[in-house]
Image (cartoon, helix red, strand yellow):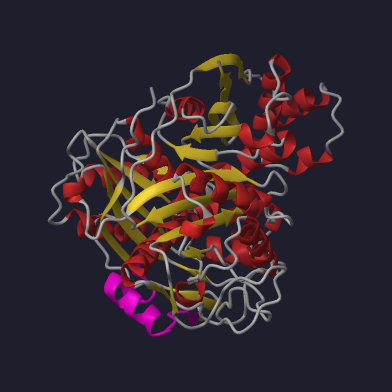
């Protein structure tokens, strides 16, 4: 028998952006005021936050702690309770500390080290979960939290997301020639690039209606997908993002008639906005009021999905959405219902999307309407069909992995441009799928879920060493793109046409989290086959152990 779905409600929320705290940020957006300003230190327009320092903590950690304090103060839950889980979303964490220290590995640059420091401050009963999925990290955090709450392992999840600006990040995006010389203008015909920002936000998700904020807003659905197209450029068709939107709406049992508005990623880069217009139109939502918030606060990376979801929650409550700052008219392939002014909404339900490097996409559905819970899918079973561990070798990694690759007789010259972690994963996945393949599995039903401790620190060091040389040509886009851990998974999505979930967890050791999440995807009918496991590479040492699960 199918079980009744567990309702997931929105509890307390908090954020700080370049516009100020939550109240100031929302007031500024209502008044069409942007917080983007030229920063001489970065040589570009950015959205910088007024972060209050906390003794003994880095700037990044202080950003997250402030937001956690805000949502936990007065709450009837505590991280010290076993039924409460902390989920952290970030793209780069403390990466700014690597500057001038790229020959060393600073413990503080390990994202999970910061996660534990934060969790310890609150005497957390459970180990925190860290999600580093490029620019969809924040929305991914909602999707992962939803799955864990629906499994019944926890009653409450506290999501906190954040990223702090530093030269590492600004120079990396600049290397792609994707930065606008002026504050960004999402979807506008004259748009010429993004503007970076920094922010942090926190949201309590709860299965206890008594602890939810009123009026009730539910996290009704969510999904992650991949374009399987390019690691640094969005799909030209919009199919990957469409799959995420469609799957999220299907889970929520909603049609396009139920949706009141769409809040998109809307970075103001030419190809991103074009792709999103296609995806939204394909989902038959192009007649819904739509907005992007990047013109107010910039692209805040791992925080964006969290702070923008909070804005969506407030927009549902007020019955109207903020205008898209900087928008006048569009030239996207499909014209969305955009405006620089506030737009009323007819339905109290919205879709929030995100897209990022590695071809990843995510979407969630937030619903304020009173509806009957949708039955859960009847549980399926997952079975292990293949396992492969990349062997140790006395050879240097470069020699070993080149020899392994050549043994395939593969002519894919792109292999040589990949980061070492991506090369190791490439070979391991080839060996794994030689045991049992994916040929019979539909592309949108294939998924990949990975975890490691160092994220992309090996590639981070390479990028930082280029910066430390202060070369006239600046940073290398080829090096920067691999400073996102999930790009290794993105390479596999392109190679093996994996268009389903592609989540990357950061943890101290292999706890089985990736395997648990992979099995859950199959058992809850989100996927039919999932590659999962541990994928670690740092300074010539590797530990890559992956498995393939399929529906039984």
Q: Position of residue 219 (x, y in %)?
A: 37, 49
- Compared with 254, 45 (above or below) is below
Q: Which residue: 62% across, 33% down?
A: 445
Q: Is residue 106 magenta?
A: no
Q: Give the left or right position of residue 427, taking residue 486 as reference.
A: right
Give the quarter of the figure containing the N terminus: top left
- 459 vs 16, nearest the viewer: 16
- 423 vs 517, nearest the viewer: 517
Quarter of the image where one finds residue 458: top right
Q: Position of residue 275 (x, y in %)?
A: 67, 61
Q: Which residue: 45% across, 73% down?
A: 297
Q: Which residue: 32% across, 80% down?
A: 27
Q: Give the left or right position of residue 399, taking residue 84 as reference.
A: right
Quarter of the image where one finds residue 410: top right
Q: Position of residue 282 (x, y in %)?
A: 65, 56
Q: Is residue 96 something that shows in the picture?
A: no
Q: Give the left or right position of residue 93, taking residue 525 as reference.
A: left
Q: Position of residue 427 (x, y in %)?
A: 71, 27
- Compared with 321, 158 (above or below) is above
Q: Which residues are magenta?
A: 16-38
Q: Give the left or right position of residue 193, taking residue 146 as reference.
A: right
Q: Which residue: 69% across, 58% down?
A: 476
């Amino acid at each position: 028998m199918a079980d009744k779905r567990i309702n997931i409600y929105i509890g307390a929320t908090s954020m700080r952006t370049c516009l100020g705290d939550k109240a100031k940020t929302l007031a500024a957006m209502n008044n069409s005021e942007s917080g983007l300003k030229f920063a001489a230190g970065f040589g570009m327009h950015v959205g910088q936050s007024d972060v209050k320092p906390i003794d003994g903590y880095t700037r990044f950690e202080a950003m997250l702690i402030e937001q956690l304090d805000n949502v936990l103060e007065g709450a009837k839950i505590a991280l010290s309770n076993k039924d409460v889980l902390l989920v952290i979303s970030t793209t780069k964490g403390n990466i700014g500390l690597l500057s001038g220290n790229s020959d060393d590995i600073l413990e503080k640059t390990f994202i999970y080290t910061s996660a534990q420091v934060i969790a310890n401050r609150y005497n957390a009963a459970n180990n925190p979960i860290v999600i580093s999925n490029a620019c969809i990290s924040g929305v991914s955090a909602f999707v992962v939290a939803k799955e864990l709450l629906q499994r019944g392992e926890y009653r409450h999840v506290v999501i906190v997301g954040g990223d702090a600006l530093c030269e590492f990040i600004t120079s990396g995006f600049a290397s792609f020639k994707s930065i606008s010389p002026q504050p960004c203008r999402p979807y506008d015909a004259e748009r010429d690039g993004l503007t970076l920002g920094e922010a942090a936000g926190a949201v309590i998700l709860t299965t206890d209606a008594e602890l939810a904020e009123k009026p009730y807003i539910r996290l009704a659905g969510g999904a992650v997908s991949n374009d399987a197209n390019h690691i640094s450029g969005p799909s030209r068709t919009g199919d990957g993002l469409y799959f995420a939107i469609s799957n999220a709406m299907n889970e929520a049992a909603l049609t396009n008639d139920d949706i009141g508005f769409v809040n998109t990623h809307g970075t103001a880069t030419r190809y991103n906005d074009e792709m999103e217009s296609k995806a939204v139109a394909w989902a038959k939502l192009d007649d819904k009021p739509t907005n992007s918030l990047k013109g107010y606060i910039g692209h805040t990376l791992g925080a964006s999905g969290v702070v923008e979801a909070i804005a969506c929650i407030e927009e549902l409550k007020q019955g109207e959405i903020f205008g898209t700052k900087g928008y006048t008219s569009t030239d996207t392939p499909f014209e969305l219902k955009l405006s620089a002014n506030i737009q009323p909404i007819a339905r109290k339900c919205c879709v929030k999307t995100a897209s990022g490097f590695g071809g990843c996409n995510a979407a969630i559905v937030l619903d304020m309407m009173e509806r009957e819970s949708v039955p859960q899918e009847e549980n399926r079973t997952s079975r292990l069909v293949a396992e492969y561990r990349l062997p140790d070798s006395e050879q240097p990694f470069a020699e070993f992995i080149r020899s392994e690759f050549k043994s395939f007789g593969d002519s894919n010259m792109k292999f040589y441009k990949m980061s070492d972690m991506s090369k190791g994963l490439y070979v391991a996945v080839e060996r794994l799928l030689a045991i049992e393949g994916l040929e019979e599995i539909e592309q949108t039903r294939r998924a990949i879920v990975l975890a490691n401790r160092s994220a992309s620190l090996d590639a981070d060091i390479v990028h930082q060493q280029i910066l430390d040389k202060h070369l006239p040509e600046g940073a290398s886009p080829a090096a920067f793109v691999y400073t996102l851990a999930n790009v290794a998974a993105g390479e596999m999505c392109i190679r093996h046409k994996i268009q389903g979930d592609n989540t990357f967890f950061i943890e101290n050791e292999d706890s089985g989290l990736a395997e648990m999440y992979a099995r859950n995807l199959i058992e809850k009918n989100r996927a039919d086959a999932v590659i999962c496991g541990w994928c670690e590479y740092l300074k010539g040492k590797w530990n890559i152990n992956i498995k393939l699960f399929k529906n039984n």
